[in-house]
Amino acid sequence: MRERRVVVTGLGLLTPLGTGLGATRLALAEGRCAIAPATLFDASPFASPLAGEVRGLDPRAYFRVPKALKLCDRRTRFAVCAAAMALEDAGFPAGPCDGLGVSIGTSGSDLGAEELSAALARSEDPALSARDTDAFGEAALAGLNPLWLLVHLPNMTSAHVAIQREARGPNTTVMTGWAAGLSAIVEGAAWIAEGRADAVLAGGADSAVHPFAFAALEQKGLLSGPSPLVPAEGAAVVLFEEREAALARGARLLGEVGAHALSAGTRLAALAADATPAPSRQLERLAGNLLAAHAPAALVLSLAEGLAGPVAAVAMGPAGEASALLVLPPDEAARSAA
């Protein structure tokens, strides 16, 4: 059976440069920089306190069930908001949809760093050199929010996107390090090509502006040196649809998936020949490195500009995880299939 064709019909973007695709594009065009000392926590003890923070976002405008906000960490809130933007951009029908899947990539959670650290501190017994596990169970866990685990479970990001958008198709949260966002996009495209879903919200969401992320990056020497990494946060989501279904509902086609690949190492050279879209470099310079959402954000910006030719989005993580996606302009894809 011939694989079904996969097209992009909607875009959602949330970055330190602005809420929404339009605001981010305007900020990039004006050369505005969103990198500044972190305000979400005291980052002064680290080699660099700089971060790219999302500011001024009111997530209630994007949540169908606002009370769910208390169960969402920052990355999950960003994912829900970007998914809502993508659906609106595509003019996708509202309401429950059995054929709508969700595939979101993230590099991890902050585990409620401040709350967890306070709980750990309460478990210290001055009379003992080692941590008292009984004290931790009785004092520390008793002081944690009862919903703490539900907020920070790895699969919560895609779960909340599905709940808020009433998406009843396949659902996964991809966690393959810095390549997670693009890996999730590749996974979502494959679902449609294989007939497992008719439409998929796919992308990346992350927040690295917390003590655990800063500590990990500093330990690896990535916060200092000639080309330091600036931790940032944000989300980028595309809406994929099966081509014939998208055309039947009169959707605007922004691009068509030409090829994709996932790898644990080095076999992406052919797809990566055109490298990452140029907006990736602009985002890194002006908004910080969005980690798992970085390659998806660059892809979204490239699609928003209108494709003059094929574009390859590539993401590689420090442990060798990698993913790549080739997107063709709709007209060129149609000629290739003829």
Image (spheres, rainbow, N blue to C red):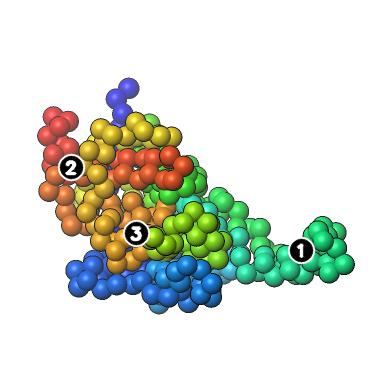
Relative depth, front residue between 330 and 51: 51
Kind of residue sitting beneath label 2: Pro
To which residue does mark 2 refer? 310
Disc 3: CA contacts within 10 A as few (<14), some (14-19) or many (>=20): few
Residue 63 shown left or right of residue 314 in the figure: right
Quadrant in which the N terminus appears: top left
Give residue 141's mark.
1
Residue 28 found in image quarter: bottom left
Residue 92: x percent and y percent? 33, 54
Q: Give the mark nearest the N terminus, 1 or 2.
A: 1
Q: Give the mark nearest the N terminus, 3 or 2.
A: 3
Extreme right residue here?
Answer: 127
Relative depth, front residue between 86 and 141: 141
Residue 197: x percent and y percent? 40, 39
Kind of residue sitting beneath label 1: Leu
Residue 173 vs 63, above or below: the answer is above
Give the Cα separation between the discs numbered 3 and 2: 30 Å
Give the Cα separation between the discs numbered 1 and 2: 52 Å
Residue 310: x percent and y percent? 18, 42
To which residue does mark 3 refer? 227
**Mark 2 and mark 1 in contact (Cβ < 8 Å)?**
no
Q: Nearer the viewer, mark 3 or mark 2?
A: 3
Residue 49 seen anywhere in this rendered image of the structure: yes
Q: Residue drawn at (46%, 42%), measured in percent from left and top? A: 319
